[in-house]
Amino acid sequence: MVRGRHPAETVMEQESLIWLLGAAALVVQVLGFATAVHAVMSARTAQGAIAWSIALASVPILALPLYWVFGRNRFEGYVQARRGKVPDLAGLADSLRRGTAGSCTMEVGFGPEDTVYERLAAMPFTRGNDVTLLIDGPATFEAMFEAIAAARSYILVQFYTVVDDRLGMELQRRLIERAQAGVRVFLLYDEIGSIELSRGYLDTLRGAGVSVASFETTRWPTNRFQINFRNHRKILVVDGEVCFIGGHNVSDDYMGRNPRRGRWRDTHVRIAGPAAIEAQVVFAEDWYWATGTVPVLDWTAPPAAQADRAVLILPHGPSDEVESCGLFFTQAINSARHRLWIASPYFVPDARIVSALQLAAMRGVDVRIVLPARPDFFLVHLAAFAFIPQAEQVGIRFYRYQAGFMHHKVLLVDDRLAAVGTANLDNRSFRLNFEVTALVGDAGFAHEVEAMLERDFADCCLQTASDYEDRPAWFRVAVRIANLLSPIL
């Protein structure tokens, strides 16, 4: 006969369970308060600090795991890992300066304030560069594959997204071909952006002698749970002489082969000359973070034979001592005197960028911002509407691109400075992503970018405040909610 449980035992077990649950709740609450203090002390914006601290203090059981994964915007370990351990990069900025007859800021007609860009990059504008504007995927990858085929010594390839579709397989074939010809090939990809990339694709490359690594944003004790940091850079360097930077990833979407998206509007640049060495610096530092090694590379790029454009490669990232991406945009906006044209697929600026744009328009600057008409991420698309009424009041004009999906990141300041890169006008690029921008200080190139953006305007419709104000109430409420979430989008 089975002896029944004594009622006192059941009560004791229930009391123990209640005590354990209470103790666990107390621990979670204490962790929530402690993490809220961390959020207040480390957040780069007041809005983000307030949002996280309130959530962590009030609902820690939900907010704690979210904060561990998404909360921090300071990437730990990157600077510490490279500082003093990458001898090939030590003193390179000074060497570039000497090799190009000094920083050429004043020689290309900039104001003294434009030395800010050099300080942000910790590298100088270099002369003797040839820059080619590459519009859309077919032109971009044709130029890239041509450069890869001509490689003699090494190829450095870095993309946020690599997909093993038709374009991805073509890239794989060409890299393997050069590796088998004795060229050293290095491929660096972001493990979140390339999450669908098959292991077989990578193993095939490794089997052919290609050095392959993921960026590993979670590699460091304090980054262990962070999937919010991404390496969003797209860089190709061949022999230290030619580099490519821009918005294209490796996917058939970027070739316009996705019938749902139609044309994919994007821009890259091909740069031949000393600026390729600066792009190589960016790749080498990322490769060192991912692998702990620096490839043996050539650090003496000759000037282009028939061109003398001033170029600076400006990397941005969450490991920077200052918020370099946001400062770059702020400086560019503040320096505009008569024209400021920006193309960005995402527009979720913080208060300082909004103020700078408004002040530029009030100075009489022609401020135009090109955005996609078709949303990619719906919350980000909604958040952009919140800025249109106040921007329109001071003369800022918004254009929505109609002829496909617009993804390029381009900035034009007056007739003297153009930028093509990977950074968007949003919080993620300002504070969370590793990005890179090519700045070109040349009137001729600025006119090429002007003509390109004029063609984009022809494929746009002008968006006005009524496009927001005349929408149903539910839409306007959704826009406001998305705007409140903008610090963490």
Image (cartoon, helix red, strand yellow):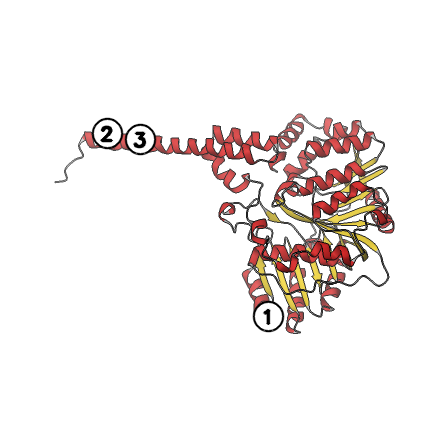
Q: Is residue 58 above or below residue 342?
A: above
- Which label sits in the foreground, 1 or 2? 1
Residue 183, position as x, y percentages in the image: 66, 70
Looking at the image, the residue that sits furthest to the bottom is 181
- Which of these two is toward me, 370 or 245? 245
Is 198 placed above or below 34 here? below
Q: Is residue 472 above or below residue 298?
A: above
Q: Nearer the viewer, residue 206 or 5?
A: 206
Q: Can you tell which mark lies on residue 208?
A: 1
Q: Quadrant of residue 306?
A: bottom right
Specify which label sits upstream in the sequence, 2 or 3: 2
Quadrant location, the C terminus: top right
Label 2: how many residues lie within 10 Å, few (<14), some (14-19) or many (20+)? few
Q: CA distance from mark 3 to mark 1?
A: 60 Å
Which residue appears at 52% of the width and 46% of the height? 223
Give residue 26's position: percent from left, percent from top.
Answer: 38, 30
Q: Position of residue 51 (x, y in %)?
A: 56, 30
Could you give the CA–CA distance between mark 1 and mark 2, rounded to whole angstroms?
67 Å
Q: Position of residue 196 (x, y in %)?
A: 57, 54
Q: Is residue 255 visible?
A: no
Q: Amino acid at mark 3?
A: Trp
Q: Earlier in the sequence, mark 1 or mark 2?
A: 2
Q: Is mark 2 in CB contact (under 8 Å) with mark 3? A: no
Give the residue pinned by disc 3: 19
- Report if the CB atoms under discs 3 and 1 are less than 8 Å apart: no
Residue, disc 2: 11
Q: Secondary structure at mark 3?
A: helix
Distance of label 2 from label 3 (alpha carbons)? 12 Å
